[in-house]
Image: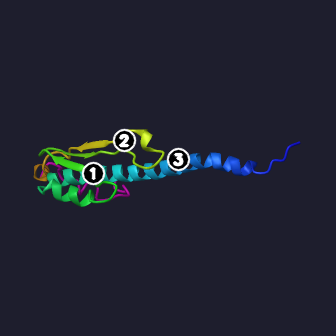
């Protein structure tokens, strides 16, 4: 029977690229998920700012200034806000994933002033959250 000296070292050397590939994939996925979260929230915040009569760019620029969203761009067309976040994996072993770009469009609806007086008086209906007065 032959000696098996060095077998575990050889197996470890064969597995190190796989381990690093998995580690880099997890890091890239975490960065991408964080970027998509901020891009989505920036589009929502921009549309909400638009709805209440403010500049959408103020809200989107504040949320898209991080490292994960440094390439994201917000476009305000007066009715909706679109955030486009180009993404290509740039970590070792993961660059073969391809294009992971993300685009989200949010439309918040009519201006806030258009809702005034249209909701009726709901204070009486929801005055008692326990519904003791027969909802």
Q: Which tag, 2 or 3, sits closer to the chain's start?
A: 3
In the image, which is nearer the foreground, mark 2 or mark 3? 3
Specify whether 15 is left or right of 52: right
Q: CB of mark 2 within 8 Å of CB of mark 3?
A: no
> With 76 as the anchor, is 35 left or right in this view?
right
Q: CA distance from mark 1 to mark 3?
A: 25 Å
Q: 40 or 20: nearer the eye?
A: 20
Neighbour class for label 1 at 10 Å: few (<14), some, many (≥20)? Answer: some
Segment tinted magenta in the rendering:
117-135
Mark 1 or mark 2, which has the lower sequence index?
A: 1
* Label 1 residue SS: loop
Q: Secondary structure at mark 3?
A: helix
- Give the mark nearer the N terminus: 1 vs 3: 3
Give the residue pinned by disc 1: 71
Residue 106 x %, y % = 23, 45
- CA separation in Å, label 2 and label 3: 17 Å
The residue pinned by badge 3 equals 21
At horizontal 16% and vertical 55% (from top left) the residue drawn is 57
Residues 89 and 61: in front is 89
The disc placed on residue 100 is 2
98 in the magenta segment: no
């Amino acid at each position: 029977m032959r000696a098996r000296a060095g077998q575990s070292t050889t197996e470890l050397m064969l597995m190190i690229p796989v381990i690093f590939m998995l580690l880099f994939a997890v890091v890239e996925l975490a960065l991408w998920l964080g970027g998509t979260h901020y891009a989505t929230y920036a589009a929502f915040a921009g549309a909400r700012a638009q709805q209440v009569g403010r500049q959408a760019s103020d809200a989107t620029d504040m949320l898209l200034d991080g490292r994960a969203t440094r390439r994201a761009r917000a476009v305000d067309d007066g009715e909706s806000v679109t955030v486009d976040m180009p993404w290509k994996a740039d970590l070792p072993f993961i660059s073969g994933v391809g294009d992971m770009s993300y685009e989200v469009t949010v439309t918040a609806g009519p201006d806030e002033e258009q809702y005034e007086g249209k909701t009726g008086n709901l204070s009486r209906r929801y005055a008692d959250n326990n519904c003791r007065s027969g909802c």
